[in-house]
Image: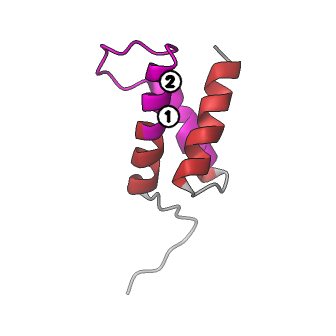
Amino acid sequence: MLIERDLQVMNFNAVGEAYAIAVNYLRRAGVLRSDSIETDDRLLEIIVGLYYAGEHNRIKLANKAITRFQVNS
C-alpha cells in the first residue's frame, strides 16, 4: 500500500509540453537564440514554479511562463 504524505507528483508531460510551446514561441519572436539546443533553465524554473503553484494546463503554463520570461528579460 502506498501512502502519500506531503508528496507532490509532477506531470512531466504537461511541463515538457509547456516548455516546448514556450521555447518555440520565444525562438520565433527572437527572444531566444534559434540555433541553441540547450535547455533554458530560467524558463524551465518559471514553468515548474507555476505548475507547483497550481497551474496544470499546458497552454496556460506556456502563456504565463512566456509573459514572466519577457517581463524579467
* Residue 13 image point, x, y percent: 39, 55
Looking at the image, residue 18 sits to the left or right of residue 12; the answer is right
The relative height of residue 14 versus residue 22 in the rendered view (above or below) is below
Residue found at the far front of this picture: 28
Secondary structure at numbered mark 2: helix
Q: Which residue is mark 2?
A: 26
The relative height of residue 8 versus residue 63 in the rendered view (above or below) is below
Asked whether 24 falls inside the magenta stretch, the response is yes
* Residue 35 image point, x, y percent: 30, 13
Residue found at the far right of this picture: 71
* Residue 1 image point, x, y percent: 37, 87
Q: Which residue is mark 1?
A: 22
Q: Which residues make up the magenta segment?
A: 21-50
Q: Which residue is at 57% across, 57% downward?
A: 57
**Amino acid type at image mark 1:** Ala
Q: Which residue is at 36% across, 16% downward?
A: 34
Q: Which residue is at 57% across, 58% downward?
A: 56
Q: Assess disc 2: are there few (<14), some (14-19) or many (≥20) residues with their C-alpha within 10 Å of its C-alpha.
A: some
Cβ–Cβ under 8 Å for marks 2 and 1: yes
Asked whether 44 falls inside the magenta stretch, the response is yes
What secondary structure predominates along the stretch shown in magenta?
Answer: helix
- Quadrant location of the C terminus in the rendered image: top right
The relative height of residue 22 versus residue 16 in the rendered view (above or below) is above
* Residue 67 image point, x, y percent: 67, 30
Secondary structure at numbered mark 1: helix
Which mark is drawn over residue 12?
A: none
